Amino acid sequence: MPPDDSIAAADPLIGRVIADKFCLRELIGVGGSGTVYKADQTSLGRTVAVKVLRQELACDPRLIRRFHDEAQAASRLNHPNVVSVIDFGQTDDGLLYLVMEYLRGATLTDVLQREQLRPDRVADVVGQVLSALEEAHMAGVVHADLKSDNTMIEHRRGWDLVKVVDFGIARIAGNEDTVTDDNSICGTPEYMAPELIRGGEPSTASDIYAVGIMLYELLLGYTPFSGHATLDVLRRHVDELPMLPSKREPTLAIPSYLEQAALRALEKDPLQRFATAGDFADALRPAAASTQAQPDRKLEEACSAC
């Protein structure tokens, strides 16, 4: 979210130099896991983004070790749809920081607040997210908190460039929108897979479920399971089948293959979802409609009462 002007004006970190080379210039984002600054990398004369995690995290040796493990894994990812991690570490006074490429786009959440995306654009955006996810999963990296807020999009002369950020951050620190505890239950309620809610570990399957939520959200403008209370949202993930998007919004021209792909990704049983992010991406192409007749019938029967 954008920073409050009063918070930005009073921020004591503005002007500070991290690791002798990253000068924090401007507060550009505030979240539950930390704050993000626009910064100058003085040694190379370029602009970067520096995320400073919540100060209390540095008091827990377990979280510090996890931070280094997750940041190191994320820094090894090299993909056009994954934000580049340039550096990470801990300052002398204990601040944990992550240095990333500076992105000039908006979050997918912000884009959805401004416009309804066409189905072909939805497929392209989700396909890029899945491409990033496929690369990460092949490297043994699970995101653990995929959502529209963690997806940046920059519109470039008729096409979109999508970047997924914050790989592994949910395993380190939760926020007011994130559920996390010592059993590694982590994620944002609207995007959490049922097995996570039951106490399971984040996995490739739970990442795929989260992208299914994102696809559903992009088609309709809202997520399939919502509620005023967090526990109600979590219960709906476990107990309720998602309604077919075309039945929820009959006036929208939603291609069948896209809503069927979303429903398969949202299967309660992880084994019934797409086996890989690549398989999910394949289902986003129009030609996939004729090759998924059997799964489609099953999903339509399951949702016939919705």
Image: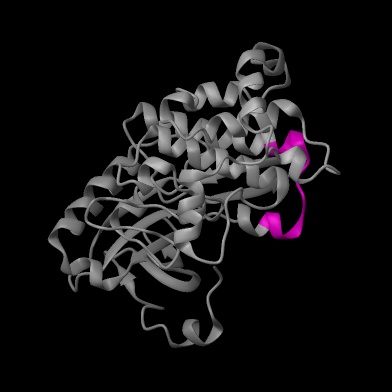
Q: Is residue 133 above or below residue 146?
A: above
How far across and how far down the image is residue 137, in percent? Answer: 38, 30
The residue under the point 47% across, 35% down is 268
Residue lying at the far left in this picture: please name it.
61
* Bounds of the magenta segment: 111-122
Q: Nearer the viewer, residue 30 or 47?
A: 30
73 relative position to 213: left or right = left
Residue 46 in view, yes or no: no
Which residue is outermost to the top? 291
Task: Using the rendered view, name the quadrant where residue 306 is placed.
Answer: top right
Report whether 142 appears left or right of 209.
left
Does the magenta stretch mainly form a helix, a strand or a loop? helix
Task: Find residue 167 and report its horizontal and vertical position in percent.
Answer: 39, 46
Q: Residue at x 78, y 41 (%)?
A: 118
What is the quadrant of residue 188 in the picture?
Answer: bottom left
Residue at (74% x, 45% y) in the render: 248
Is residue 4 rendered magenta in the image?
A: no
Which residue is situated farthest in the front direction here?
Answer: 305
User: Residue 192 at x, y = what percent?
Assistant: 45, 48
117 in the magenta segment: yes
Most extreme residue toward the right, as rendered? 251
